Amino acid sequence: MRLNREQKRILEGKEGKILQQAMIGLVDYGTALGAEEFVPVSSAHTFFQSPKGAAQYFPPRRVQLSEKQIGEFCEELSRIRVKARTTIDPGFLDLEKWGQMGGTEISYNSARKVVDICRKTGIMANWTCIPYLVDNIPIKGEHCSWSESSALIYINSMLGARTNRDAGEASFFSALLGITPNCGMHLDENRKGTHLIDVQCALSSTSDWGSLGYFAGKAVGDGIPVFTNLKMPTVEEAKQLGAAINVPGGSAMFHIVGVTPEAPTLETAFGGNEPVGAYVFDESAKKKVHKDINHQPRGNVNMVFFGCPHLTLHEIKEIATMIEGEKVAKETRLWVMTTHSIRASAERLGYAQVIEESGGELLADGCLLTYYVYSDSKKPSLERIATDSVKQGLGARRSFGSKVFFGDTKQCVDIAINGRV
Ligand code: F3S
C-alpha cells in the first residue's frame, strides 16, 4: 500500500507501540483486500467490552495475557486520543443495574475500567448497537469504519455513509488512526445492487420487516439486495430489516428503490448491471420464514425479550402503552433493552416506570447474547424465549438451545402477561 509521510512515521514506531501495531494491522488488512491507499475516516464504531478484549487486538494476539500486561496496555492506550468520532457496541452488563441483575464486582470493575479508558482516549462508551440514532450519526458520503453487522448495513443503506464490514480490531485501529483501507464499500462501483427482491405482500409489523430481511439475506449471501414495491420504512422497520439480512447473510448494504439515497431508480440501484438473481417475497415466503424461526414455540415462556437491535424511545413507548396496568406472569421475565441515553429519556417520560410497575425490566448497555455468553452474572433461564427480533430468536436458539416464539411486539407482550404461548 502507498503510505504518506505521517503514516510511514507511525509504521516506523515514531508515535509509540500501540499506534505502530494498529498501522501494521491496517496495512495487512488493506493489502489482503487489495487496497492501494488509505482514506480518512471521521467515524468509527467498534467493540470494547473489556480491557482484556481490547488488549487482544494487539500482538501477541489471542494469547493468555497476565494482569500486568493488560494493565500496561491500558496505561499506554489511555495516553492516545482517537482520531475519529468513536462509539462502542453493547457490553456484558448494565452499568447502573448490574447488582440487581446478579452481576459480580469483578465484571462491574472491568466495565468501569473500559469507561475510564474511553473517557481518556475520547471514545464514547455508549455501549449500543444503534449509535447511528444517538451518538454517532454519519452523513451521506462520509467514510467510516464500523463493526456490528446490524449497524453498518443501516448507515451504508439508509444514510449513504461508507463503511466496510470491519471486524472489531480493524475498526478499533481505524478509530486510533483515523484511516481505513480505501476499498470495498468505500468505492462507488462496489455499492451497486446484485439481487432483485420483489415484495408482494403487506408488512404490518417490525417483525415482518425482519422476516423480509431474513428471506433476503438467505437469497443474496454477501450480495446487495434491491427491494422493489416497498414503502418508506420507519427507522424501526429499517433497523429490523438490516439486522435480519445479516443473520443468514453477510451484506454491507441494501437498496429500496425510490427510498434509500443511492437508489432513486431501479437502474441507479443496479448501476447498469443485470441482477444475478431475482426473488419474490410473498405471503407464503413470509409464512415460511416464521416457520423457520419459530422452534417449539408452545409452552411456558421464561423470557420475553425486546431490544435487538436496541430499542428506540418510540418502541419503548409502544411497549409501555401495551403493558400499562398489566402484570408480567410470575415465572416469566420481561427484558426491554436499549442504550442508556434512551433509557434516561424513557425514565423522564414515565415509560420506564410503566414497564417496571408491570414487572418488566428496562435495561441498558448490554445485549442478551453478550450478556449470556460473557458475563459472570447470575442469569434467568432461556429455555423458551419470545421475541419480535429475527436476530435474537435465531441467536438464542443457536447459542443457548432455546425454544423460540417469534412474532410481533403485541403478541410478545401478551405472552409476557400470560406466561405462555
Ligand atoms: Fe444489538 Fe446484541 Fe442484537 S449487539 S443487534 S442487541 S445481538
Image: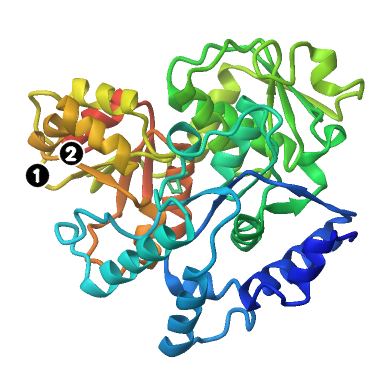
Q: Is mark 2 within 8 Å of ligand 1?
A: no
The reply to whether residue 400 is in sight is no
Pointer 1 residue = 330
Which three-letter amino acid code belongs to the residue tagged 1? Lys
Q: Residues within 10 Å of mark 2 (few under 14, many from 20)?
A: many
Quadrant assignment, res 16: bottom right
Residue 383, placed above or below residue 26: above
CB-based contact (under 8 Å), mark 2 and mark 1:
yes
- Residue 140 place in picture, x, y as percent: 67, 27
Q: Nearer the viewer, residue 250 or 219?
A: 250
Distance, label 2 to label 1, CA atoms, is 7 Å
Q: Which mark is residue 417?
A: none
Q: Residue at x 16, y 61 (%)?
A: 99
Q: Nearer the viewer, residue 70 or 105?
A: 70
Which three-letter amino acid code belongs to the residue tagged 2? Gly
Which image quarter is the C terminus in?
top left
First in residue order: circle 2 vs circle 1: 1
Which image quarter is the N terminus in?
bottom right
Residue 55, placed above or below residue 415: below
Question: Seen in the image, is 368 located left or right of residue 302?
Answer: right
The reply to whether residue 309 is in sight is yes
Quadrant assignment, res 418: top left
Q: Residues within 10 Å of mark 1 (few under 14, many from 20)?
A: few
